[in-house]
């Protein structure tokens, strides 16, 4: 609730205390990963990117696997993620929105959020391979469950990342998919995020007419 109210300092204090109690009680449940993800969000909201990154990476370690910054590992994960994206595009009925179990869906939402936020942190730190690997992972996870606000965000994150590789047709395709999902989930915050994120990509690509058409309405 503190996070929803924007009371980030209060939220950080509460969540750190929750982690401390969990460690004292030997709690190794997925809930610890969820708390780390919330801490990551809280720290990024107050501009403490190093602490935010630490908690997002811890969330991933608990719920998925350890984060690696090794170039060979990152390249392998990028290749695997890109292959899965290809399968999602070609055989969407087999790979997209296939997970229905409620608990699994929550875990996937938390993981996708953590990977997506990490992609943003890595992007600003000029960690190109890390950005691409985590961005693709966030999107593949988000696509495996029913459409959510996180899926809209992940599409835009991929558009920005792909845009840095000058794959502009593909980047625009991801922008369009993000816009469609934001409309489907009918979430105002998602619509604003997609418009602003698409604007970031289009500014970098020099598409000023498209920026003027999408960003001002969001503001």
Image: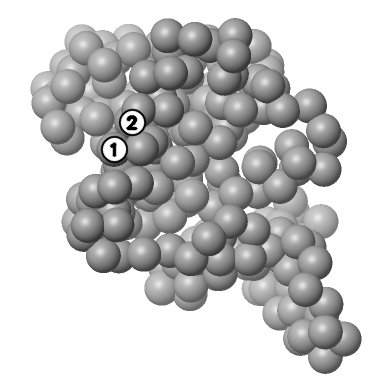
The quadrant where residue 42 appears: bottom right
* Vertical order, 109 against 205 (above or below): below
Which residue occupies the foreground of this view, 27 or 36? Answer: 27
Q: Which residue shows up at 47% across the image and 18% down it?
A: 88
* Vertical order, 87 against 58 (above or below): above
* Vertical order, 90 against 124 (above or below): above
Colour scheme shown: one colour
Q: Identify the element where label 1 is drawn.
A: helix
Identify the mark at residue 79; answer none if there is no mark: 1
Of all residues, the one furthest to the right in this rendering is 25
Asked if labels 1 and 2 touch by Cβ distance under 8 angstroms, the answer is yes
Residue 95, horizontal then vertical, whole percent: 57, 19
Quadrant assignment for the C terminus: top left
Left or right position of 20 against 134: right
Quadrant assignment for the N terminus: bottom right
Q: Which residue shows up at 59% across the image and 9% down it?
A: 93
Q: Identify the element where label 2 is drawn.
A: helix
Q: Is residue 193 visible?
A: no
Left or right position of 200 against 40: left
The quadrant where residue 162 appears: top left
Left or right position of 176 against 168: right
Identify the mark at residue 82; answer none if there is no mark: 2
Which residue occupies the foreground of this view, 180 or 212? Answer: 180
Q: Which residue shows up at 58% across the image and 56% down it?
A: 64
Q: Which residue shows up at 22% across the image and 57% down it?
A: 72
Residue 127, horizontal then vertical, whole percent: 23, 57
Q: Is residue 65 visible?
A: yes
Left or right position of 80 against 66: left
Residue 82, horizontal then vertical, whole percent: 33, 31
């Amino acid at each position: 609730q503190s996070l929803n109210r924007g009371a980030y300092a209060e939220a950080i204090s509460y969540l750190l205390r929750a982690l401390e109690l969990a460690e004292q009680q030997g709690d190794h449940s997925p809930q610890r990963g969820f708390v780390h993800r919330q801490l990551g969000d809280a720290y990024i909201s107050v501009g403490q990117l190093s602490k935010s990154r630490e908690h997002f990476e811890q969330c991933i370690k608990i719920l998925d696997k350890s984060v690696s910054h090794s170039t060979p590992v990152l390249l392998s994960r990028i290749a695997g993620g890109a292959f899965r994206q290809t399968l999602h595009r070609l055989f969407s009925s087999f790979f997209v929105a296939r997970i229905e179990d409620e608990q699994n869906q929550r875990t996937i939402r938390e993981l996708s959020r953590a990977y997506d936020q990490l992609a943003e942190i890595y992007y600003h730190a000029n960690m190109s391979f890390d950005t691409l690997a985590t961005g693709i992972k966030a999107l593949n996870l988000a696509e495996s469950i029913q459409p959510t606000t996180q899926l809209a965000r992940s599409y835009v994150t991929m558009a920005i990342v792909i845009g840095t590789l000058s794959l502009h047709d593909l980047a625009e395709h991801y922008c369009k998919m993000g816009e469609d999902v934001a409309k489907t989930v009918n979430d105002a915050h998602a619509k604003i995020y997609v418009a602003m994120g698409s604007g970031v990509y289009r500014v970098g690509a020099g598409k000023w007419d498209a920026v003027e058409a999408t960003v001002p309405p969001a503001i």
